[in-house]
Amino acid sequence: MTVVVVTGTGVVCSIAADLVEFATALRAGNCGINSRPDMVSDPMRPWLAADLPEWNFARRLTESASSSALHPAVPEIARRAAGRAPVGVQMSVVVAMQAWAQARLAVHPVDPERVAVIVAGHNLNGSSAAIAAERHARSPVHLSPRYALQFMDTDHVATVSEVLGVRGEGCTVGGASASGNVAIVHACRMIAADAADACLVIGAMSDLSAAERQAFYNLGVMAGAVSRSDPLRRCRPFDVKREGFVPGAGAACLVLESAASAARRGVEALARIAGSAIGLDGNSLADPTVAGEVSVMRRALARARLRPGQVDYVNAHATASVLGDVVELAALDEVFGADGRPWLNSTKGLTGHCLSAAGLVEAVATVVQLREGFVHPNRNLEEPLASRCRLTGSSAVPARLRVAVSNGFGFGGFNSSVVFTDAA
Amino acid sequence: MAAIRRSVLDIFPDLDPALVTEDRSLQELGCNSVDRVDVVAMTMEDLGVSVAASDFRGVRNIGALATLLRRHA
């Protein structure tokens, strides 16, 4: 059986511009949620978001130019390929460059035809689409021809391949909010099938249009309807007074690689993907089920040849939605029963719900906690829902973690679970 | 010509504006296939003109592009 390991990680989100900042922010329990000033006064509009504090692609490239872990031509190729691209594509490029550098792929390369790119997510460009539609309505002939390339989610795959010189397989993989985990599973299969030695798995930013944001809000799954003050207190995963999720801007990347390839290159494995599972609920609604979530966690653990009692930590899907959190806790209780009490937290309480990218942002969070030996806080957890798991409170807990489970569940009954173990 | 120069510089902020001359092609300035059609669309918008895509066939340099756009102004 092919062993798949993580050799590189990258992340950009509301609380961090890179991996080092991310580790610090997780430990501190920093929260990137803020109010959108133009929306606060209208009770019918979504007013909360965990947006990036700033985004300057040119500056990010200049900073990366000093990195000896990247080919010196990469920043200039990136500027040329993505300088005029939407922010989401630029973020995909930056997280891919970070992970590429950490995996030492420039210094100890893999044959470019044996490197693959999978971008997790779909409908990534809602905001650009809305701008293009408005432009088109005003004056069709002046619509930017570039939009023909940019409206396709595959633009993320193509642009990253150009920047890093990747020549292996490439595709997008989707599964609503489970997209990140679904992409990780498909990357592992690609490597196990010997179609690639290494795969960049990129969780791309969901650049929501105003209409998409509003639809979530109208559906009643977004926080902010209960109170319109204290943005930092509105996202409350696992709390009795939770209100719903807050959308977050984020992108993240894992370099997954066969253990044999990492060993050949003499590169350290950061963690190992020990097992995973995907399953559908047979249900097109936003109604999660205990049975579906139990099934993927059990199957993922069985594939990892691990008992529930061996799991030290669960990075929950936990968006802080009223139904989702309670269903996930019930599923966790059923899986773990009397056999174990893993630590449990929700990264979405800090970063917001990064939608397409959530699975990758949380995979990076999981790897960071495994390696650094802590469990990050649960923000705003004042009155916890009943659970057999050990929920962290307002501070991080030092913990020796060997086995971690990361869950991802999406609208339309997309269930997924990935088991990470330490590299040893 | 000034409008074309503005569009090219929008795409290549570091380019020497003096290089945008009538006898040069957009390709010679480093524009790829998408940059070229983008320069045309941006310039048309800047000038408030509309030219059918088919009319650009046969345009080989910046001077010819300027002439075509001027004819539709």
Image: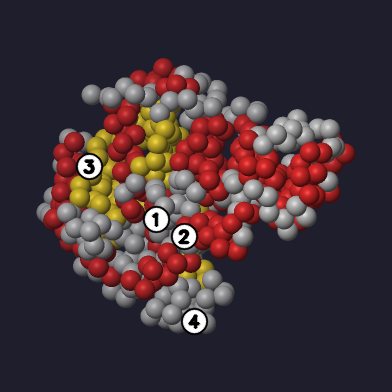
Distance from Cα at disc 3 to Cα at disc 4: 42 Å
Q: Residue A120's spot in the image, x, y percent?
A: 39, 44
Distance from Cα at disc 3 to Cα at disc 1: 19 Å
- Name the disc covering residue A42, or none: 4
Dot 1 crowding, Cα within 10 Å, few <14, some 14–19, many 20+: many
Q: Residue at x 32, y 75 (%)?
A: A241
In the image, is residue A301 above or below residue A198?
A: below
Q: Residue A98's spot in the image, x, y percent?
A: 53, 38
* Depth order, front residue of A244/A84: A84
Kind of residue sitting beneath label 1 = Leu
* Depth order, front residue of A86/A264: A86
**Disc 4 sits on a residue from what chain?**
A
Q: Residue A204's spot in the image, x, y percent?
A: 45, 47
In the image, is residue A267 above or below residue A86?
A: above
Q: Earlier in the sequence, mark 1 or mark 4?
A: 4
- Discs 1, 2 touching: Cβ within 8 Å: yes
